[in-house]
Image (spheres, helix red, strand yellow):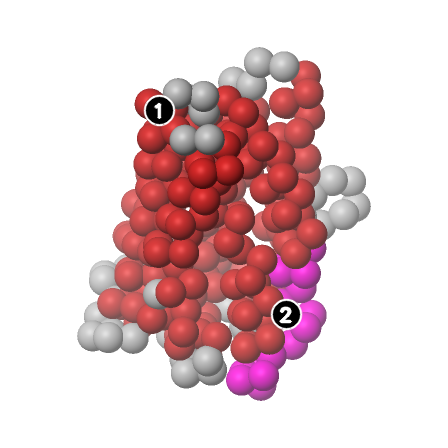
Amino acid sequence: MAPDEFEAALRAIGAERYHVHHPFHHLLHGGKLSKPQVQAWALNRYYYQACIPAKDASLLARLPTTALRREWRRRLEDHDGSGDAAGGVERWLALTDGLGIDRDYVVSLAGLLPGTRFAVDAYVHFVRERSVLEAIASSLTEMFSTDIIRERVSGMLANYDFVSEQTLAYFKPRLTQAPADVQFALGYVKEHADTVEKQQLCLAALRFKCDLLWAQLDALHFAYVEPALPPPGAYRP
């Protein structure tokens, strides 16, 4: 495929598979969840947020040039923070604080759903073990994240009296960080996926990433919405 055709194929994956289409997200954004159900979402999503720097660090160690490492180091700072500036992980803990979940309990991961753990661990292992090109391609779900962030923030502020702009402060920086991440990653993938085989590997990597995000919501929906059967040891509001 020519570069523009390849980009269109990548974007088509998001149009079909991105988790904005999941029933749990429609419930979350539409104000149809109870506070305990929103708490369960935030608690489980914390594990994903906390593992993003770990997967980025594993990729950073394999990047061959100073320019690439500098670019990817910025992502670590976005999530882990830099100096006195809080990163995404800390801002997510502010969200769980605002929802009334004990921070020590969140960080302990004691209430995590097995489905969440398996999905997130699979992502970390994928980035660690696959090629640099595939690892970078798997990050391209950020192409689709800006719209879901706007929808999430506006929907939750409109529908839940237990959240505020301060509670949801994690999301505002992502509206500028994610497009910057995409500009680099998409350009890299379009330049380096220069054979049919490499393009297919990138498409498969993006499908994999969409699938694991979907699987996390499947686990939440099963445990806390329908049939509402949290497994042993999982968070019980």
Q: Main SS of the magenta segment?
A: loop
Taking the image as shown, residue 207 lies to the left or right of residue 45, namely left
Please name the amino acid that badge 1 sits on. Answer: Val
Q: In the drawing, what numbered circle is on residue 196?
A: 1
Q: Quadrant of residue 163?
A: bottom right
Q: Quadrant of residue 37?
A: bottom left
Which segment is the magenta one? 157-173
Q: Residue at x 55, y 62 (%)?
A: 147
Residue plotted at (68% across, 61% down): 172
Q: How many marks?
A: 2
Q: Residues within 10 Å of mark 2 (few under 14, many from 20)?
A: some
Disc 2 target residue: 167
Q: Residue at x 55, y 70 (%)?
A: 151
Query: Is residue 142 depicted above or below 74 in this figure?
Result: below
- Residue 203 vs 45, above or below: the answer is above
Disc number for residue 185: none
Where residue 41 appears, as percent x and y from the top left, is: 42, 65
